[in-house]
Amino acid sequence: MRVKTGINGVPADRALMPAKSGYHIIVMGGDLRRQAGIKKPGDMVRIELWLDPEPDRINVPEELAETLDFIPEMKAAWDKLTPGMQRSMCYWVRSAKTAPTKAKRIAELLRRSEAGNFQVGKGPDAKPQSKRRSSTDDSD
């Protein structure tokens, strides 16, 4: 469920995520914690929370939007992604500190869409997940 929040007065757009315990949590990255002045677990915070009136709205960075408009095949692949995946990719592009890095990230998204592996962490270039070895594994 998408929510708008104010965390110690810092506005944020987040997901209210259910936990196994039955409670819901809001994930806050390091940037947001720093902006809100949260230094360590247990720090008191002031939270304001309300439902996002447009939960599926995604702020696509201008450079990425232009690329999607220019390349219809990439746009078609983009439209098949979940809003959460689109939001994640937009954050990745937007978080680039320089224009060349932003351009490289958009080029990487284009490469992945052309290869049919548009989702982050999917496809042949994804890092393999660690696999537990059993005591009977003879592969050495």
Image (spheres, rainbow, N blue to C red):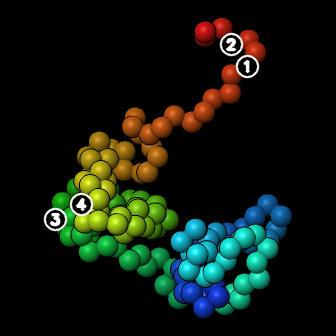
For the residues marked 4 and 2, what is the alpha-carbon distance in whole angstroms? 45 Å
Horizontal and vertical percent for residue 24? Answer: 74, 72
Horizontal and vertical percent for residue 48? Answer: 66, 90
Query: First in sequence: mark 3 or mark 4?
Result: 3
Secondary structure state at the residue bearing disc 1: loop
User: Which disc number belongs to residue 22?
Assistant: none
At label 1, the amino acid type is Ser
Between disc 3 and disc 2, the foreground one is 2
Name the residue that disc number 1 marks: 134
- Is residue 75 visible in the rendered structure shown here? no
Horizontal and vertical percent for residue 120? Answer: 43, 51
For the residues marked 3 and 2, what is the alpha-carbon distance in whole angstroms? 50 Å
Secondary structure state at the residue bearing disc 4: helix
- Is residue 9 visible in the rendered structure shown here? yes
Name the residue that disc number 4 marks: 100
Name the residue that disc number 2 marks: 137
When the figure is inspected, residue 129 is found, relative to residue 105, above or below; the finding is above
When the figure is inspected, residue 128 is found, relative to residue 59, above or below; the finding is above
